[in-house]
Amino acid sequence: MDLNRMLFTVPKESITRTELTALLKSHPEVKFVSLVGIDIGGHDTDEKIPVELFLKDMEQFFQQGVQTDGSSVVLPKITALNNAKVDIIPDREVNWFVDYNFEHLCSDCGLPIGTLRIPSFLRHNETNEVGSRVLLRNAIETFRADVLQLIKDNPYVLEYTEIETVDDIDKIVMTGATELEFWVKTPEDRADREQLSTSQELKEQYWQRTRGPVRSALEKTLLILEQYGFGVEMGHKEVGGIKAKLGSSGKYDHIMEQLEIDWKFSTLMQAADNELQIRYVVKDVFREYGLDVNFMAKPIERVAGNGEHTHMGVAAKLKNGKTVNLFAPKNMKKDFMTPIGFGAMMGILKNYEIMNPFISSTNDALNRLKPGFEAPICIVTSLGIDAKNPSRNRTVLIGLIRDEKNPLSTRFELRSPCPKNNTYLIIATAYLAMLDGIKAVLEAHKTPEELEAILSKQYGEEAFYLEKDRAYRSEEDVYQAYSEEERNRYFGKAPATVWESVQGFALCPDKLEVLKKNAIFDELTIESYREAILAQWAMELHNRIIPNTMDLVRECKKRHSDNDCTDLDHANWSEIDRLRTYLGQDEIINKSLLTRIKIALDENRYQDASDMQLEMQTCVAKMFDTYIEYKKNLF
């Protein structure tokens, strides 16, 4: 197909009745329009409206959007069966994208059928705006206005930047981008975990040359993403995967590889919208080549998971057109950051407990955030040995990315998110946390030297803004330099279940006020989100994880005869059978662990269910490891 004949992006500058009409009539392959609202759970709506109807009633669509049933989107406590009117209202301040169905060609022009996807806001009962895009928009507006006012009230901070006076500033600009990691495989293939783990340890896949259908799919994906104007920077193999096999047919099969795609920064709302469209393109193109795409955080236990490192920056656009990074200090060789940068970093570190429920929000996300892999579990940062030697410590929660030769590139990299996370809410909560730290630092007139010392405080040391019984900076590998007990004491114990993650709201009410600024995350929104992710956690645990665990229990079968085994075989099987019985076999009085978890969930005893979920994970890991050793010893 000729990509140059296809319409991929409608720039926000072209979103007028006249230009849209001309554009859509010149692209007959675009047959449908879809208004894309994002509920509080991160799910996006999709409907097919004929282009002719949209063109005829365009002004009505702009003003009234389309209506959906509030019970069909995730907005618990906000909507109900008897109060379910939700409208999807187009956002005309961002780019719109055309989503193509490569399997359905237009009979007139021979191009794939396209749907114009319009990022939209959700509106409940005519006036109450709700959902993820609304929360992000309100956070952006608050951050932009408050930071500018803080600079005006505390102009001392400008001496550490390239800005002469407050009057030179036109507006505050926030930028973001994500890195998308994903697994691809041929359908139905199941790779051996030990093969994957060994290949990973040997770095056999990382940055290697792609081959066969993976190469073709990756190249086509990058070409299409470039047509959208996303500014693709690279696509490459990640650490996970095994070498594909060339079958007798001359085609590659048994494919199981991990890839990553990166693209350029955008404004925050545009960055989140871009990511949503990019994921759809990746899925569609790879499926064209017979490959399944998996964005799960931890699709394969004990093998590298999929992260989605989120990059965030703040700049000032000056009236003369120049852009100045507000994190980058005037003297890049002397200071790590400006007071604004230090304040933003400290705000995230101090308030991460109330950001975490928006990141560690699923069983899958928490499966990735465990020691032993390049995934963070500690609330800690790394800056570098000194300003001339920036850090690339991959064991920390949030890192400072800087280049002495390019101050505009100075930014934060939050390493905990995964592709299944709600990027809109991650960014919204992160910038509200940053704002809290920036406000404290600027109002106290702190210097970069003072702030570096504060951020580098020792556990138990009193310090401005940050908590006494915490440490916040480490230039060492936190998994190697500290024991588990030391990590928990210095940096706080990481939640291990969704229930534990959500408890951050209840355990840190003072920090929760940071999100409630200007009623952005009001009490109803917090409760709605809390109920949504707990319901998802409970249902997935009850109806998916427990049945899957039971299948694994049943797969662990006796493989030896009693007259043809060693004492080690007998001991191993006895332990496996004990664990199988404890996990999955009920008696009249004594119920198995899996049954007790289901009962606890049915009775809303979430703390008990959470505790038993952790016990289940420990038992399954021990059973699985013992079963592997048991099979290896049999002839």
Image (tube, rainbow, N blue to C red):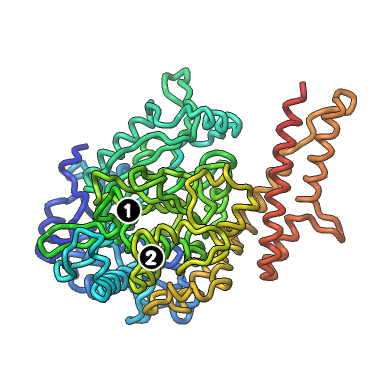
Above-or-below relation of 345 to 209: below
Give the alpha-carbon distance from disc 1 to disc 2, as whole Å.
Answer: 19 Å
Task: Tell me what residue is drawn at x 44 percent, y 81 percent.
Answer: 83
CB-based contact (under 8 Å), mark 1 and mark 2: no
Q: Which of 340 and 581 is in front in this view?
A: 340
Q: Is mark 1 on a helix, strand or loop?
A: loop
Q: Quadrant of residue 320?
A: bottom left
Q: Which amino acid does label 1 sit on?
A: Asp
Q: Nearer the viewer, residue 345 or 84?
A: 345
Expressed as whole percent of the image width and height from the top left, the position of residue 238 reads 43, 36
Label placed on residue 434: 2
Above-or-below relation of 197 to 595: above
Expressed as whole percent of the image width and height from the top left, the position of residue 587 reads 85, 56
Give left or right: position of 475 versus 609: left
Give left or right: position of 3 versus 531: left
Label placed on residue 96: none
Above-or-below relation of 156 to 274: below
Q: In which quarter of the image is residue 568?
A: top right
Expressed as whole percent of the image width and height from the top left, the position of residue 523 reads 47, 79
Q: Tell me the quarter of the image containing the C terminus.
A: top right
Q: Which amino acid does label 2 sit on?
A: Met
In the picture as drawn, the residue positioned furthest to the right comes out as 563
Expressed as whole percent of the image width and height from the top left, the position of residue 570 reads 85, 32
Which residue carries the number 1 mark? 335
